[in-house]
Image (cartoon, rainbow, N blue to C red):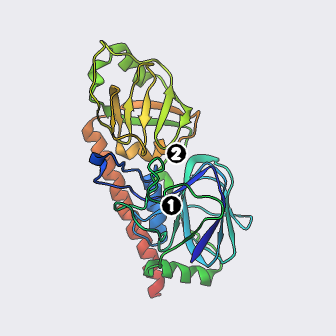
């Protein structure tokens, strides 16, 4: 079961949930920018939610399938088509041998996730299939996909096979799909919740008020490493020397120009700029789906609120996983 890349698009990489346990050696977690969409795509084809899938950025990926394959597409709407026909999102899809899947351009969101039943058959590097571009490790030869690349998919499990059998009998798409609005917003204006960063109290009171009262614009300097924002200038109450310390996905740093930078999945492992805030984990998927020139309004929440939102999200995912499994097994028994 192999897939050929006819056009790689702007940037398409293989990602899973990341490479953990090696940041002390300077090796990043990396992984999917929108982990929620990746998880749901995998669940829809019967995979473990952390299996490797394709992260497609903004536009252009074109694939040819050299065998029948069960797939699912989630995340941003990049107007995918199969042999010129519009593809329904957020549900299992059976694509036939010889068919061509093409992503046009993003009309909602920034990144789509394409999962294959059985996963993508590539070796793990340090426990992960994720592509870390700057170190050229993981994924497909440590790089983004290129024209002419061919990769193979793994063996589908019983859940995948059940969906394939159902779709073969229907000769159509499923009428049901995941209500993604429960998990993700693809609006161009987002309220992003943050908890206080370690240097929060070192910023002057006027800056703290501006940070939460005024919107910021996501500039074109936005990639998997970080998002540069433009808006009200922030300043410290007094200058001080800060030693580099650990940073993570969603850390909001403020360099000397006073314009915030949000660190993303391919950020460095340590940083020396003052940290005004930390985006809560539950809001990282929405942040990942913002296109350049989108608007961000920050909102402060407590650590307890951040934990509550993450637990709520995880419970919804568990409920969804059970629902998808029941749809496969119920039809199989019938």
Task: Please tell me the numbered disc located at residue 289.
Answer: 2
User: How would you rate the neighbour count of disc 1 (Cα within 10 Å): few for under 14, some for 14-19, many for 20 or more?
Assistant: few
Total marks drawn? 2
Residue 92 visible here: no
**Quarter occupied by residue 173:** bottom right
- Which residue is most to the bottom? 334
Query: 244 or 237: nearer the eye?
Result: 244
**Quarter occupied by residue 205:** top left
The residue located at (65%, 60%) in the rendering is 147
Dot placed on the residue nearer the N-terminal end, 1 or 2:
1
Task: Please tell me the numbered disc located at residue 141.
Answer: 1
Q: Secondary structure at mark 2?
A: loop
Image coords of residue 20 (percent x, y): 31, 54
Task: Please tell me the numbered disc located at residue 121.
Answer: none
The residue located at (66%, 78%) in the rendering is 97
Image coords of residue 86 (percent x, y): 69, 62
Image coords of residue 269 (percent x, y): 34, 41
User: How would you rate the neighbour count of disc 2 (Cα within 10 Å): few for under 14, some for 14-19, many for 20 or more?
Assistant: many
Q: How far, Cα to Cα, is label 1 from label 2?
A: 26 Å
For residue 77, side relative to residue 230 (left or right): right
Where is 158 relative to 110, above or below? below
The residue located at (43%, 54%) in the rendering is 36
Q: Secondary structure at mark 1?
A: loop
């Amino acid at each position: 079961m192999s897939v050929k890349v006819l056009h790689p698009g702007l940037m398409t990489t293989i990602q899973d949930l990341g490479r953990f346990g090696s940041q002390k050696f300077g090796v990043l977690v990396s992984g999917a920018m929108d982990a929620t969409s990746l998880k749901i795509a995998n669940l829809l084809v019967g995979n473990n939610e952390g299996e490797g899938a394709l992260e497609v950025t903004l536009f252009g990926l074109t694939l040819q399938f050299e065998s029948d394959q069960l797939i699912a597409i989630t995340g941003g709407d990049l107007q995918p088509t199969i042999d010129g026909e519009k593809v329904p999102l957020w549900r299992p899809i059976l694509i036939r041998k010889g068919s061509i899947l093409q992503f046009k351009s993003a009309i909602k969101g920034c990144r789509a996730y394409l999962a294959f039943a059985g996963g993508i058959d590539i070796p793990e590097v340090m426990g992960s299939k994720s592509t870390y571009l700057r170190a050229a490790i993981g994924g497909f030869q440590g790089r983004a996909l290129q024209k002419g690349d061919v990769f193979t998919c793994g063996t589908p499990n019983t859940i995948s096979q059940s969906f394939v059998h159902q779709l073969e009998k229907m000769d159509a798409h499923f009428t049901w799909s995941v209500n993604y609005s429960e998990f993700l917003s693809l609006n161009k204006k987002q309220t992003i919740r943050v908890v206080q960063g370690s240097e929060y109290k070192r910023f002057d009171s006027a800056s703290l008020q501006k940070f939460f009262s005024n919107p910021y614009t996501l500039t074109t300097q936005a990639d998997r490493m970080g998002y540069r924002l433009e808006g009200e200038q922030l300043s410290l109450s007094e200058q001080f020397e800060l030693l580099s310390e650990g940073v993570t996905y969603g850390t909001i740093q403020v360099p000397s120009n006073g314009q915030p930078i949000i660190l993303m999945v391919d950020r460095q492992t340590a940083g020396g700029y003052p940290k005004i805030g930390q985006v809560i984990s539950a809001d990282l998927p929405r942040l990942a789906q913002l296109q350049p020139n989108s608007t961000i309004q920050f909102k402060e929440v407590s650590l307890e609120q951040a934990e509550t939102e993450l637990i709520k999200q995880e419970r919804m995912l568990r409920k969804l996983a059970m629902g998808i499994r029941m749809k496969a097994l119920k039809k199989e028994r019938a």
